Every structure is written in C-alpha cells, then in structure tokens.
Amino acid sequence: MCYMPGTSHRRKCRSLYGKGSVKVHRAQRDTCVICTFTRFCFLPASMFSRNDFSIWSILRKCIGMELSKITMPVIFNEPLSFLQRLTEYMEHTYLIHQANASSDSIERMKCVAAFAVSAVASQWERTGKPFNPLLGETYELVREDLGFRLISEQVSHHPPVSAFHAEGLKKDFVFHGSIYPKLKFWGKSVEAEPKGIITLELPKYNEAYTWTNPTCCVHNIIVGQLWIEQYGNVEVINHKTGERCCLNFKPCGLFGKELHKVEGYILDKSKKKVCSLYGKWTECMYIVDYAALEAHKKSGKGTAEKKSSKPVCTPSNHEISLPEADTVEVIPGSYLLWRIAPRPVNSTEMYSFTSFAMQLNELDKDMDGLIPKTDCRLRPDIRAMENGDIDLASEEKKRLEEKQRAACKTHSKSDDELKTKWFQQGQNPHNGSQDWLFSTGYWNRNYPLLPDIY
C-alpha cells in the first residue's frame, strides 16, 4: 500500500516548507506535490527484526546445494511473491517508450540497454527472500499511467519456473520471459543465477531484443551486515539489425572499488564499437563516445564533472528526483541515460521496498471478482506477513506448502499432469531456445476450472 499519511507527513512538510504548505498539501498517487523527494510510503506493518534468528542453523548442511527445495522460516521472507518481484522489471517502462520514440536503431539500443540495467535496480538492499510461488499461482498488474499490463504464472514446481508476459496498452511493445532462479549456498553467501531468456519486441520496427540477467549474490549470510552485488556479462542482441550491447556487471573485488559498477559498449552491425556505457546499477548509467572513454582511461584523469548534459531517456509523466550525491565519476562528453528513482525515506523499515514495490500487493475493492482466485494478492501467508502477523504467516506458509505437495503427489499417482493455464512451453521465435510463451485468453476475464491452490 502506498499513500500519504496525513498528520505525520503534513508535520514533515511543515518543518521543511513552512506552515503554508499544509494548506495545499495533497497527493498524486505516491508522490507529494509539495515535497516530491521526501515522500513517505507505507505497508500495513513494518518489517520484523531478524536479529534473534540464525540462518546458519538452517543452511549449514546445505553448502554447495541448490536451495529451491529447502524450506526457510518466514522471518527471512519479504511480503511479496517472486511473481511480484518479477513485475518490478516494469518500474522504468518509460525507457521502452523512449526507445519506441527513436527512429535510430543505435539510440533504441541505448534505451533498451538502460532498461536491462534498470530491471535489477530494485534488488539493491533487498535482502528479504520473496515467497516461492505455488504451481498455478498468477499475478497481474495493469498500470495505465505507465502504459502496460502484465500477467505472470508459476509454470513449473521442480524446477521452479516463473513466466511473465507484459504488453503496451497501445500495442507498442511486448516484453516476456521465463525465469528459473537457481539458488546456491556457498558458506558465507547465497548466489541466485536467474536462468532464462528475456525478450523485448518493438512491433513498430519489427525488432526483437533478447538478454539474460546477471547473477545476484547476497553476502554475510552467517555474520555481519547483509549486502548484495550483481555480477556477470549481459549481452543485449537486436535480432533484426545484428547490433549488440555487451554489459559487464563487475564483481566487488578485493577492496570494493568495483562494487555495483557496470561497463559496456554497443557494437553496430559491422561489429564496430560506436559508444560506451558506464555507471552503477544502483544509481545511474551514462553514455559516451567509445574513443572518448579510451582517451580518458589512457590519460588517467580522475576529475569528475558534477553535471551531465541533457539526458536522452527521461520519463514523460514526472521528473526523477536526483539522489543527494552520486558516486559515479562522469567522463567529459557523457550524457545521462538512466537514473534510479529515489526510494521512500522510510524504505528501510519497509523491507527496503521501492514506491513501486509497495503498491504491488494492493487489493482494491474493484478487483473483487475481477482477478482470478490464483492471484497472489489472495495468498493468506503473504497477506498475513504484510499485516504484521508473523505467526499466522508461518502457519499459512506451512499449510500451503503441504497442500501443494499433496496435490502433486495425487497427480503423480494418477498420471494426470498438472497443466499450466496461461503459458505453454515452446521455442523462443528469436533465438530458438526453450521458453514459456503466453497463450492469450487471460484478459478475456473468463476463468473457469482454476485450481484451488490457497
């Protein structure tokens, strides 16, 4: 839930902007029109302290193992399903719209590459584990303000595979994929390798882009403060033009100098490097001429420009507030490609959620009878945790897991295979890999014979 709390927020507004601000104080969705940077967003209850719980007692026998079959206490979760976490890819949809507005394929690639980086930005400081979706669980989100609608479904239990399909409300793009988050415990860290292909289609140009996400790693599982890094190579391919963007999410390194850094370049169809990208997935991305970047590296200059030139990709509906300080050195001649939106000031009390994430589990009255009974907004364990009832959340989580195991056992004995409702396994039409493809029909709002998974 995302809203402007009356008294407390007006008090903060008054302290920052004077008594007159209260007279005109109002809200536009989650953003206060008086103090856009100091906005507050709230869940029904703050997150629980994990200080009294030891994850080591659970994971010490699991070193080197794949963790999808390990039952974790609910205290280590966040009140969202993994299907909802996938939906956070769409927070910066304006980059797709910006790509559509450009007539030059290299400019489109810049925006698509920025979107690929922005898709993982919400994971910064998100150390809670999303709930594992139940087989047949679904999630939908329609955002008219951002111009898209999305449907996702848990299509496989072992291995756990989540499929999603988003499309522009004006039929101007299709964004889809299937993710198998392979988790491994390495003693002091948990590594999540998001296997699966992500595809973005721009019908206006008859273009399709594909890529895979970087690996995510949570450190200090045993002792110390938890922290997250993303690392690995990501290659964004334009299958029509042959242009590519090669991105390197750098590992932290011994002294932490490379933490959160992303560097890369765009190759044209003749494999010539035409420009370079750099920045941090937790902050922003810049673009600069490839020759200028190489000259800068050779010169060994360490001075940074405080301001960049006019950004190429900006949201059309609101201006992104800048963070208090950037840690990215700006190379002369660069311009801003993307910058992360600031989080609510109370985000750390709310599982480090972004404003976008805090709205994902909202259950409005007009959804009653509209969304299917498999939608994860209706999951009792997630709802209980969001409402602050950790005991009920734990009981419900255990009940649902046992119910799913019993259902799978029944179907295996009868050779009656559990079938997916909205996605079918098939071949990705652009790179030939195995994928889960949307089979249409969901938005007709006719949901007969759905499984009773809750």
Image (cartoon, rainbow, N blue to C red):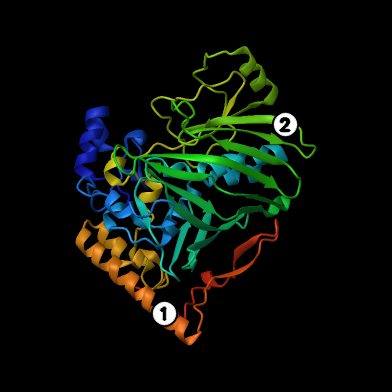
x and y, in percent, of residue 156 in the image: 50, 68
Could you tell me the amino acid type at mark 1? Lys
Q: Which residue is nearer to you in this view: 313 or 138?
A: 138
Q: Is residue 314 left or right of residue 58?
A: right
Residue 103 showing in the rendered view: no
Q: Which residue is nearer to you in this view: 221 or 447?
A: 221
Q: Quadrant of the C terminus?
A: bottom left
Q: Is residue 391 left or right of residue 207?
A: left
Q: What secondary structure is marked by label 1? A: helix
Which is more N-terminal, label 1 or label 2?
Answer: 2
Q: Is residue 143 left or right of residue 54?
A: right
Dot label at residue 283: none
Which residue is label 2 attached to?
273
Which residue lies at the image location 68% right of the left edge and 30% below the top edge? 275
Could you tell me the amino acid type at mark 2? Lys
- Estimate the spatial distance between the alpha carbons at disc 2 and disc 1, rounded to whole Å: 54 Å
Dot label at residue 409: 1
Which residue lies at the image location 44% right of the left edge and 56% below the top edge? 66
Q: Which residue is nearer to you in this view: 229 or 420?
A: 229
x and y, in percent, of residue 381 in the image: 29, 64
Residue 51 showing in the rendered view: yes
